[in-house]
Amino acid sequence: MSRQLSRAVLLPALLLAGLLLVDPLSAQPATQAVDPAMVRARDWLQTIDRGEFERAWKDADASWQKKDLERFTKDVSRNRPEAPVTVACRAGLYVELVDRPPGSMAYFDTRFSNGKRVTERVTLYYGEQDVLHAAAYKIDPPQKGKGGCGG
């Protein structure tokens, strides 16, 4: 009897634990949900997407703030499609650590509403109180065989 009872309790508990670990409805890769660099970079990119360049500049690393707002806006906008083009899809690819200064590089597969697909890279450095701040932004061709936005 006790063996049947333990199976009756153990099996549902294991199934519930499995459901908590694997979320099939999640649209974002797991790294985007847990990696602070990926989350910080995504949030900064969304600020740029909304055209809030002054806010993005104020939130950037001190080394990037040495440029005036006009130059910053021009540099960030250089390879991005002009409005009203929007981001149709952005999926986090991976994060690499940066040694000097300490920080991370977050890579995203992005498809704009005009169909252009790119890899966006945001370099982040640690500032005061160990807060990550965007320090560089670059757009490259899409990485072959990687990405969640398709071709």
Image (tube, grey):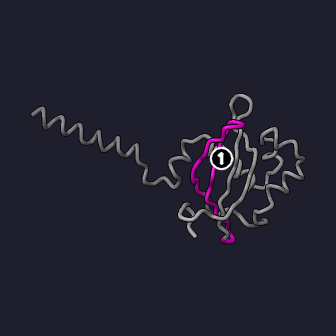
Q: Residues within 10 Å of mark 1 (few under 14, many from 20)?
A: many
Q: Position of residue 8 (x, y in %)?
A: 19, 39
Residue located 23% across and 37% down the image: 9
Residue located 45% across and 54% down the image: 25
- Of all residues, the one furthest to the left in this rendering is 1
- Relative to 13, is 52 above or below? below
Viewed as shown, does residue 126 lie left or right of 15? right
Residue beneath disc 1: 105
Q: Is residue 101 magenta?
A: yes
- Of all residues, the one furthest to the top in this rendering is 129
Q: Position of residue 138 (x, y in %)?
A: 73, 55
Q: Residue 147 versus residue 82: which sits nearer the camera?
A: 147
Q: Secondary structure at mark 1?
A: strand
- Relative to 34, is 24 above or below? below
Q: Quadrant of residue 59?
A: top right
Q: Main secondary structure of the magenta part?
A: strand
Which quadrant would the C terminus be assigned to in this image?
Answer: bottom right
Q: Position of residue 98 (x, y in %)?
A: 66, 41
Q: What residue span does the magenta drawing correspond to?
A: 91-115
Q: How many marks?
A: 1
Viewed as shown, does residue 64 lie left or right of 146? right
Which quadrant would the N terminus be assigned to in this image?
Answer: top left
Residue type at numbered disc 1: Met
Q: Is residue 23 magenta?
A: no
Q: Position of residue 107 (x, y in %)?
A: 63, 53
- Relative to 93, is 130 above or below? above
